[in-house]
Image (cartoon, rainbow, N blue to C red):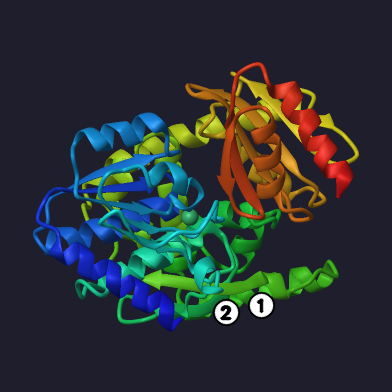
Amino acid sequence: MQPLVEAAKTAAERIRREQKLIHVVSHYDADGICAASIIAIALLKLDKPFHLIITKDITPELLQRITACEPSLVIFTDLGSGYLADIAKLPCDIIIADHHELGSIWCGSTAGRQLIHINPELFGKAQFAGAGVAYLIARELIDDRRLAQLALVGSIGDCGDYSLELFIGPGVNRERGLNIFGRFGRPLHHALESAGFTNSIQLLTELGIDPRKTLAELNATERQKLTDALVRERLAADANITSLFTDVWTLANQPAELADAKEFATLLNALGRMGSASTGIALCMGNAKALNAARDIVREYKKQLAAALEWVSNNPVRRTQNATYILAGNAISDALIGTVVSMLARNGDGKPVIGLAMSAEGVKVSGRSSTCNINKLISKAAEAVGGRAGGHAEAAGATIPVGTEEHFISACEEYLKSL
Ligand SMILES: [Mn+2]
């Protein structure tokens, strides 16, 4: 951890020295939105002017646009490690705070420029998400309770296996609780049904609990009654009860909808995918008014996601011995294909699930797998067809040229057969 902290200190010192407009570029998912907000909160407090760009991907056009502003410092959060060769062309100092798989390795100075590359993998420890790395930098600059909250929300949104203990403090509380999503945001009967418990209204009524209450609204006696009943139900079904409990993270001084870290992260993820990352940034920075806008956007997101899942169930997916491919074309938006693929992969056998959908830049590819390194697979196949890829061992994405889909799938199959 020490070298990682030292690198974060170097980045913080560089930020403190900057006099010109700082450009911040971050990823559009929950982790990226939290990472960007962490840096934004610090820069605001330090009175450093900055410009923030939230993006799905680093493209040559984006880098050109930044170059045209003649910046002297650009900060990348939750992306960048996979694009070092392109980013290094920027004619200024660069900080990358990322955790995605490394394309190549650089740091230090070159041609009078400072390149600070902070990725936990470089230090042999992959225990931080993008927001966690941003937090390590920002806490060297300012003291603000929101930083640890956002680092936690981003890490939870990223779904990786991260150590979260560092974020526990006055604004962040961890306890063991029921593993039921929607503690603050969903009526209990709905939350229970989504968690796989049937006849929830009947069960709650029998227990004397108002089904419209949320889990967070239950008093201690009601919560105990419910817990006992759910344990009994699981035992009666001969099911495992350990999955009934989980770490529950509560954020202090947040409106109810943002008080549970998982719910907050889910909301940010939906906003990012709907092209409203700015609403997410506003929420992270404490603008309570942004909640109204967020609610409307999330409603629309759920509608689109339901339609996408319905499309998948009504249209043939391509299953080979090695993987499942969803050729969605224009039927599923490129912003939703990753979520759809995640949901299918969760219920699958661990073999790769790969979705392809049309996007403005080409064909967006999104893959998940727990049995092979999906980032390697997708990178290899994307490279074979002239595309660009990046991600993690379990989840990765790419953009490939339109018309190369079949070639891409053959390249995947070839690679999978060779394993
Ligand atoms: Mn991330």
**Residue that appears at 62% across and 38% down:** 366
Tell me which amino acid carries mark 2: Gln
From mark 2 to mark 1, how far is it between C-alphas? 6 Å
Does residue 369 appear to the left or right of 286 in the view shown? right
Residue 246 % position (x, y): 59, 73
Determine whether the residue tagged by mark 2 lies in a helix, strand or loop: helix
**Residues at circles 2 and 1 in contact by the CB criterion of under 8 Å:** yes
20 above or below 303? Answer: below
Determine whether the residue tagged by mark 1 lies in a helix, strand or loop: helix
Does residue 139 appear to the left or right of 107 in the view shown? left
Total marks placed: 2
**Residue that appears at 29% across and 53% down:** 111
Quadrant of res 78: bottom left
45 above or below 166? Answer: above
The label on residue 266 is none
- The crowd level at tag 1 (other Cα within 10 Å; few <14, some 14-19, many 20+) is few
Tell me which amino acid carries mark 1: Asp
Residue 15 seen in the current view: yes
Q: Nearer the viewer, residue 117 or 168?
A: 117
Residue 255 % position (x, y): 29, 60
Does residue 45 appear to the left or right of 241 in the view shown? left
**Residue that appears at 45% across and 59% down:** 106
Residue with the mark numbered 1: 228
Residue 146 seen in the current view: no
Q: Is mark 1 within 8 Å of ligand 1?
A: no
Q: Nearer the viewer, residue 50 or 268?
A: 50
Residue with the mark numbered 2: 224
Residue 248 % position (x, y): 50, 72
149 above or below 39? Answer: below
50 above or below 248? Answer: above
